[in-house]
Amino acid sequence: MRLQLIAVMGVLVAAQLTGCAADAGSMELPGGAVSYDAGAADAAGFADGCLPNGCAPDEECIADECVAVDCSENVTCSEAGTMCDTLAKACYPTNGACKSANDCPVFGLASSDVTNRCSQGFCQAAIAEPQTIPGLTPVLAEPIAVLRPKPGEVFATQADVVLSWVPESTGHILVVLERLPTKAGDLLRAAVWGMSVAKSGKAEASIASGKAIVAGSWTKNVANLPTNKTLYFFIQAVDQVSLLATSKPIVFRVGGGWPKHGDACQPDANDGDLCDHPVRPLMCWLGSCRRICVSHGDCAGVGHLCGPLRQVARICVDK
């Protein structure tokens, strides 16, 4: 899964009034803010709106109106020990303290794969596990529980892959996907392995017990799973007429391993996957994969502290 990051860049617009009328429509307010006369604004081409740097110190020009904000690119947080989420224009504790997930910042993390949760009083950044395949509507809302693989599990070879689950009282269709489908009709085209299990069958399978799926069609051949690549295990419980239940797509890998904090990377479009991790969000920063964090607790496993905001996210830095 690709962790997508966006940078929200503030665009500075400079308006220069020329001649004697340059200062005629403006006056200085306490704190250095400047108020502009509407007539002068009309003459300069800024009718019916606010001007850059024309709002009060605790306001931002948003959609042509001066709006009070807790903080922004130009408005600093007033309380000590807080930092600004410029996307939300709100201040949050620098140490990541929280009472609920609503107390956690998002900064520039615009990907739906990234989620912030509140655990034991502190924010934690994590990759949100996929919940379903869009377009599938099982009768039962409760997902089938997958026992193996564990999310993010790495198997040395495909002979080591163990697939197990808590069975429903019906037959099951198992598939391994090489990508997450965007719609139900794309499910088989994303599959590389499949197996059907009868109602009374054992709730465990190996890759050798199934068959390859190629270009959306089941074959009689033994599958060779892609190695060192993100894969997903997915289950459907079916009877003769309906889809009763599905599992969550569980991410795993055969061979290799996931990138780690400190691994080398190149921050360009061709190497965008080098810091992808199924559980812990990473970003490529100055040539190495760095753990994205919202509190010091996110960095405990790598012996670091959660540093200041770097463009679009906070990352773990040396103590």
Image (cartoon, rainbow, N blue to C red):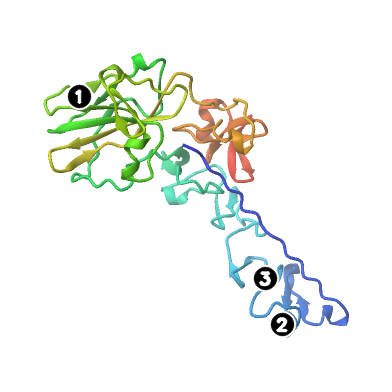
Give residue 272's quadrant in the image. top right
Q: Quadrant of the C terminus?
A: top right
Instruction: Give the residue at mark 2.
Output: 42
Residue at the image point whose x is 54% and y is 32% from the top:
299
Q: Nearer the viewer, mark 3 or mark 1?
A: 1
* Residue 33 x %, y %: 73, 70
Q: Residue furthest bottom?
A: 39
Give the side of residue 173 with respect to residue 84, left or right.
left
Instruction: Give the residue at mark 3.
Output: 55
Disc 1 residue crowd, few under 14, some 14–19, many 20+, Cα 10 Å: some
Give the side of residue 247 with respect to residue 307, left or right.
left
In this rendering, the answer to whether 58 lies above or below 280 is below
* Residue 176 x %, y %: 33, 29
Q: CA distance from mark 3 to mark 1?
A: 65 Å
Q: CA distance from mark 2 to mark 1?
A: 73 Å
Q: Nearer the viewer, mark 2 or mark 3?
A: 2
Q: Report helix, strand or loop for mark 3.
A: loop
Amino acid at pointer 1 = Ala
Tell me if residue 306 can be seen. no
Dot 2 or dot 3: first in sequence order is 2
Instruction: Give the residue at mark 1.
Output: 203
Dot 3 or dot 1: first in sequence order is 3
Q: Report helix, strand or loop for mark 2.
A: helix
